[in-house]
Amino acid sequence: MKDMEKIEPIVYDRILLTIDADDPDANTKALRYAVTQAKEFNAELGVCSVLEGSDINIYDSLTPKKLDAKRTALNQVIEKYVEQARSFGIDKVTAMTSEGGDIDDEILDTIIPKFNPDLLVCGADKDGEHHFYSISVKLAKKAKISVIVVR
């Protein structure tokens, strides 16, 4: 029998949690997983969401107050999860948002290169009918890092 290589544990230094502002149940499950891993590995946790292009109609884009209100609402959602992570004992937490375009493209092309995580954590609906489910699948297929989709 050949000598088996020693198996080294996987260690995560930077974990990115994606948040869907419209799906608090999936977010809570994904948050629980992400903070557990962040605590286990003493990893930095990024919490991100995208203000998708389809949420910004032409009227909103021409009305700064409307656009600012949408940004503020998204930031408030993100901040709620950041605070929950901190109350769980995660000291290194970073909030991130992006806007425009497709959610998966924004996460893959903008947020991941900026934060440089080694693990991406996403939530998924039980029934798979919510639009973010397909986003999680796309991220799992396209990302060059490990992706966990939490049910």
Image (spheres, rainbow, N blue to C red):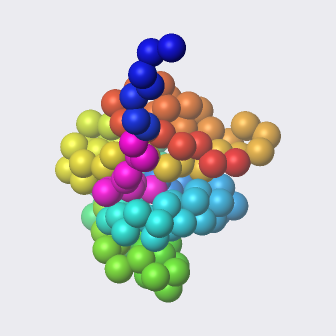
Determine the residue positioned at 79% across, 40% down. Answer: 127
Looking at the image, the residue that sits furthest to the top is 1
Q: Residue furthest left?
A: 114
Q: Quadrant of residue 109?
A: top left
Q: Residue at x 47, y 66 (%)?
A: 40
Residue furthest out toward the right: 127
**Is 110 contained in the magenta span?**
no
- Lateral position of residue 11 relative to residue 138, left or right: left
x and y, in percent, of residue 64 in the image: 28, 64
Question: In front: 44, or 94?
Answer: 44
- 73 vs 21, left or right, is left
- Per the rendered image, the range of residues in magenta is 8-17
When the figure is inspected, residue 68 is found, relative to residue 2, above or below; the finding is: below
Residue 99 placement (x, y as % from top left): 32, 50
- Residue 13 can be seen in this image: yes
Q: Is residue 31 left or right of residue 39?
A: right
Main SS class of the magenta portion in the image: loop
- Is residue 99 in view? no
Examine the image and state in which quarter residue 91 appears: bottom left
**Which residue lies at the image location 52% right of the left edge and 81% below the top edge?**
88
Q: Going 46% across and 82% down the picture, which residue do you hit?
A: 89
Residue 96 appears at what percent x and percent y? Answer: 31, 61
